[in-house]
Amino acid sequence: MSAANQLGNRARPIRVLVSKPGLDGHDRGALVVARALRDAGMEAIYTGLRRTPEQIVDAALQEDVDAIGVSVLSGAHQHLIARILELLREREMEDVAVFVGGIIPDQDIPALLEMGVAAVFQPGASTAEIVELLHKRLKP
């Protein structure tokens, strides 16, 4: 079987940047997601803690990613996500899917989806759901 067939006709594995913006210092969830993506055959790049939206989008551009996963526990999700999406538009990277996980109140989810977020994962979501979303969203 050719490498292209093993990857579902993709020239390369799905590349995902996993990021922790803002002042939040807890990254266990982000690390679990990054590991699950790798276990699913994707390339996961973890940016580390306390990144700015600018650093996240710069890394996404440099790494040529297909998606950005943003983990937010600080309550600043709407502001941070809006800025990330704005920067993606400015750099003509609208094709990069953005998904969000963390402590996101139910009432904030519609606004995030309306902004252009592909999905929001709250506590208790399975890593299989995230992998499934990326496979559906980024199929060849």
Image (tube, helix red, strand yellow):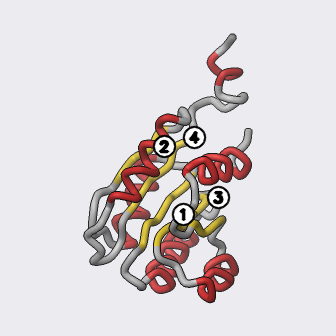
**Residue on which the image places disc 1:** 124
**Residue on which the image places disc 2:** 36
Front one among 140 and 28 = 28
Rounded to the nearest angstrom, the CA distance separating label 2 from label 4 is: 13 Å
Rounded to the nearest angstrom, the CA distance separating label 2 from label 3 is: 23 Å
* Mark 1 secondary-structure assignment: loop
How far across and how far down the image is residue 138, in percent? Answer: 68, 47
Query: Dot 2: few (<14), some (14–19), or many (≥20) neighbours within 10 Å?
Result: some
Q: Residue furthest top?
A: 1
Sequence-wise, the earlier of marks 3 and 1 is 3
**Residue on which the image places disc 3:** 95
Quarter holding the C terminus is top right
Res. 14 mark = 4
Q: Are marks 2 and 3 in contact (CB under 8 Å)?
A: no
The amino acid pointed to by label 1 is Gly
Identity of the residue drawn at 71% across and 52% down: 137
